[in-house]
Each structure stands twice: as C-alpha cells, then as structure tokens.
Image: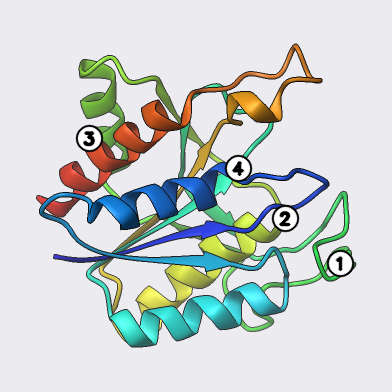
C-alpha cells in the first residue's frame, strides 16, 4: 500500500511543528516496511491545497493521512468530519485571515473521513496509546487540507483511505506554557507508525 503522510511548517510564533518533525523522523527511518511518502505543507489557506494536490498527483496514494498540531491536544485526536468552511481566529503564514468563506464553493457542507476510525481508536486503546475521536477539525488550515484530501479522494478515486489526526505539542514548545499538554517526539512518532501499520492492513 502506497502511503502519503503530510505535516505542516511552524506557525503562530512557534519554532517547531510536531507534524513536520514526525514526517521528517519517519522519512529518515524509512518507516520500516511501509511504502511511505511525506510532504510538508505551508500553513496557508491558498497554498496548502495546491501543494497537497500536487503531492497526491505525484504519489497517487492508496492511503493519505494528514497530521496537524493542536495546542489543546493531550493525545492522538482522530478527526471524523471536515467542514466546507474557512474561518480563522488568527492569520495564516501569508497573513491571510478568511472569515465565513468556503473551501470549495460547489462542495458539500461536510465530508466524513474514510478511515475505519472506530477500529483504529480501539486498536490504539488496546495498546495503551492515548487517543480519542473528534467531530470537528476546526476551521483553520488543518480543516482545509482535510476537506481537500477527502474531496480529491471522491473525485479522483485516490486516496481510497483518507483522514486527519491532530497531535499534541512537543516538550520544547511548552517551556513557557506550563499548563499546556505535550508528548515526547519519540512517543508521537511511534504512535503514528503504529497507526500507519494498522491502516496499511485494512
């Protein structure tokens, strides 16, 4: 199974983005037996969908998993629904802050992941890996990428399996934010590898 894993560059004043670090770590390790391709997307409402579509066209993956960072996450957050809306609390890295705009003008109001999220959630819990299912990926660039990923799967036939997962901060990102949850990079990387191994056998 050919897999595309995407992450994001840093944004919002952070020097790191866990999703980027995960992609880099798995790419360097060759991710074991997985036929894995990784891409780092810009935190840009306009550029991220373009970069994602280019990656999908190049790789033509069977499975595509988007990763994003959430400051509120304390575990692996498996997203279920992508909304056809862009409404930003802060500007993206291009200083663009859309409000009440659509990801795809002719698209459905919402699209649902094609990952077997109940089975995935149970699989992780059985292995003691903290996870939960979420019903909204927000309305920032993560959601735009998630919606685009699902729409491309519908219209082009690939990826057959597509989803999005939010991950927590890294320890070095929380030195001045004592109340913010975090997980070590090595732990998050091993969790994403477990997720990819599980999904590659579906």
In the depicted structure, whether residue 189 falls above or below residue 125: below
| Apparent side of residue 67 relative to residue 28 in the rendered image (left or right) | right
| Apparent side of residue 29 relative to residue 103 in the rendered image (left or right) | left
The earlier-in-sequence mark between 3 and 2 is 3
Mark 3, residue position = 119
Label 3, label 2: how many angstroms apart (C-alpha)? Answer: 27 Å
The earlier-in-sequence mark between 1 and 2 is 1
Q: Which mark is residue 98?
A: 1
- Could you say which quadrant of the image residue 170 lies in? top right
The earlier-in-sequence mark between 1 and 4 is 4
Q: Nearer the viewer, mark 4 or mark 3?
A: 4
- Could you say which quadrant of the image residue 177 lies in? top right
Q: Which mark is residue 140?
A: 2
Write the residue at 88% across / 52% down: 90
| Apparent side of residue 85 relative to residue 80 in the rendered image (left or right) | right
x, y percentage for residue 117? 32, 40
Around disc 4, counting alpha carbons within 10 Å, would you say few (fewer than 14), some (14 to 19), or many (20 or more)? many
What kind of element bears circle 2?
A: loop
Label 1, label 4: how many angstroms apart (C-alpha)? Answer: 20 Å
């Amino acid at each position: 199974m050919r897999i595309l894993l995407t992450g994001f560059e840093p944004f919002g004043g952070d020097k790191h983005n866990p999703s980027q670090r995960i992609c880099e770590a798995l790419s360097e390790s060759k991710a074991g037996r997985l036929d894995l391709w990784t891409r780092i997307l810009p935190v840009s409402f306009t550029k991220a969908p373009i970069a994602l579509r280019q990656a999908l066209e190049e790789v033509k993956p069977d499975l595509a998993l988007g990763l994003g960072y959430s400051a509120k996450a304390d575990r692996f957050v498996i997203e279920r629904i992508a909304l056809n809306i862009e409404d930003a609390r802060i500007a993206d890295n291009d200083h663009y802050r859309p409000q009440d705009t659509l990801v795809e003008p002719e698209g459905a109001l919402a699209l649902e992941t094609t990952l077997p999220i109940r089975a995935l959630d149970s699989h992780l819990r059985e292995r003691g890996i903290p996870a939960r299912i979420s019903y909204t990926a927000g309305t920032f660039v993560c959601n735009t990428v998630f919606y685009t990923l699902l729409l491309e799967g519908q219209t082009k036939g690939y990826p057959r399996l597509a989803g999005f997962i939010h991950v927590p901060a890294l320890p070095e990102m929380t030195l001045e934010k004592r109340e913010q949850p975090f997980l070590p990079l090595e732990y998050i990387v091993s969790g994403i590898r477990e997720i990819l191994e599980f999904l590659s056998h579906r």
